[in-house]
Amino acid sequence: MTDRKTSWGVYAGLVFLLVLTLFPFYMLLISSFKHFDQMILEFWTPSFPLHGDNYASAFRQIAPFIWNTVFISSCIVVGVIIISSLAAYSFVRFDYPGKNALFLLILSLMMIPGFLLLIPQFMLVQKLDMLNTYQGQIFPPMAFGASMATFLMRAFFEGIPKSLLDAADTEGASEWRIYASIVMPLSLPVIATVAILNFLAGWNNYIWPLVATTGDSVKPVILALSTVTGTLDQGISVKLAGYVISSLPLLAFFFLATKPFISGITSGAVKG
Amino acid sequence: MSASLARLRRNWKGYLFLIPVFAVLASFKFIPFFDALRMSMYDWNGANVKSYVGLANFKELVRDATFLDSLGNVAGFTFAAVIIQLIVPLIAAVLVFHVTNRRLQQFFKVWFVVPLVIPSIIVFLTWQWIFAGEYGVLNEFLKVVGLESWTHAWLGESKTAFTSIVFVNFPWIGGINFLLYLAGLMAISGELFEVAKLDGMNAWQRFKHIELPLVRSQIKLILVLTLINQIQSFENVLVLTNGGPGTSTMTPALYLYIQGFSYSRLGYASAIGVTLFAAVLLLTWVNQRFIRDTDKID
């Protein structure tokens, strides 16, 4: 761009805004290591000794629910990738009557807001006897992720040279082989985008599990946080430690794969 | 005719690849959608009572004081969010864009995005603690700076609850809109800024004449996204206030949830959903027209 030096005003403004943005999480982090007396005496600064026992007892209470969330989110991701890539392959590879209408139908389902479906989906899942099950928390979110994913994957598949697929066809490869051994391996970037988008959404799901689960057996971690408690000495810090623990997996992914994460998040927004 | 038959014979497998996605979409979106429309005309508690009542739910809705309050609230939340989301993330994006050191630019970009990666419920729970009456972060801060008389149970008093909800996520940067703006700015040709430099433009002129006009499509997108998201908002109020105190932070979507799952008035809740859906559709349509018209003028 330009060779000018960035002015100090820009840096000052950015540092100020960044400090404000991250301050709540700084408070969350330092407070999660305190006991009640440290919270009162040293509110704003880290206080020693750091109390790892907060984390131990928070982890004991939420560990099974973290496993639930990981399992549910992973199933949503795999499910969305399978059904959406198959549909996208169909739209790119074949030419049949009603193709565009069917594609538009899939896209238009994005217009239906989640709250409108909350009650009928609940009734449906109840009727299918899927309340308090994993599948009850997997299929409805899959339906919410599938439209966007089909859209993104179709756009990506369009970029794969047709001649490559036709060549495989004349070599006698079946459509299934072309899909599984040529198109999918070439599409890892878009698969990563779709995976990140749906994993984030799956981890964040709150209302649907709140409605679709009652007991503890299949509850995701986000719902379990409200029941985390500590001893009198520990105070609310155990709860705060629980917040940190359940944020860590996503944060770790984010810092390991910043670029696909950011492009995944942005392409997910542009559905409007 | 025979040509299209031949085409069909070659391409019928295409339908097979569509079966899984349509199986899922039909069962969990399409059918529930029509169920919602139908149920809005029933008096239904999910168990033994189920009778057709025509438009009675909608008639009750327009006289329901809580629902009307919630409409006022959502209008207020939406108005505040639109102003905030159009301006604040843009300021941050412009500042980050003008950091010339690439590594520092990447650093700011990544760290501003961190709140987006933290589950939204955890962000809400963190702000619940910030606003808490006893040992809440905000009240402790006010005590430190000698404004003890200003402390409140921020979410528990009807005077302050609404504003507190608006201030969740302050300074409102860590979100998708910041990224969208930044992507828009990055797409502006570097030559434009060279010319601006030669012309001796200052930062404000550059913003007004180059950056602002060229992120116009992002501004429109963010306007639409903010409107649609705000109309649907209820996780924040569900976690932070449950619509209270009284109805001071009730939103229509939260009211739907409460009517449906606390009072088992499934038909009435569906009527709220259908009304909201109509509002979303109307807004989308207005926006489409509005956007198309401005594009034509250009």
Image (cartoon, coloured by chain):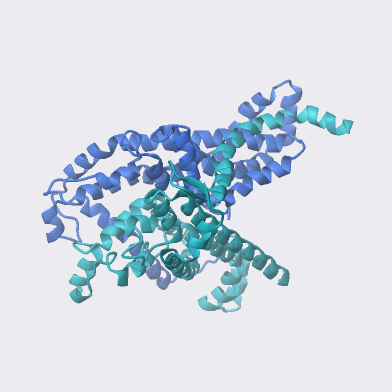
State the residue lying farthest toward the right: B2
Camera-nearest residue between A2 and B186? B186
Give the quarter of the image for residue B111. bottom left
Please identify which colour was used for chain B in the image.
cyan
Which residue corresponds to the image point at 63% horizontal and 42% vertical from the top-left?
A156
Residue B27, image x and y in percent?
A: 56, 37
The reply to whether residue B267 is in sight is yes
Chain painted in blue in the figure: A
The reply to whether residue A159 is in sight is no
Residue A232, image x and y in percent?
A: 12, 49
Q: How many marks are shown on the rendered structure?
A: 0
Residue B60, image x and y in percent?
A: 48, 61
State the residue lying farthest toward the top: A172
Camera-nearest residue between B205 and B297? B297
Asked if residue B269 lies left or right of residue A249, the reply is right
Camera-nearest residue between A174 and B205? A174
Asked if residue B144 lies left or right of residue A198, the reply is left
Give the quarter of the figure containing the C terminus of chain A. Answer: bottom right
Give the quarter of the figure containing the N terminus of chain A. Answer: bottom right
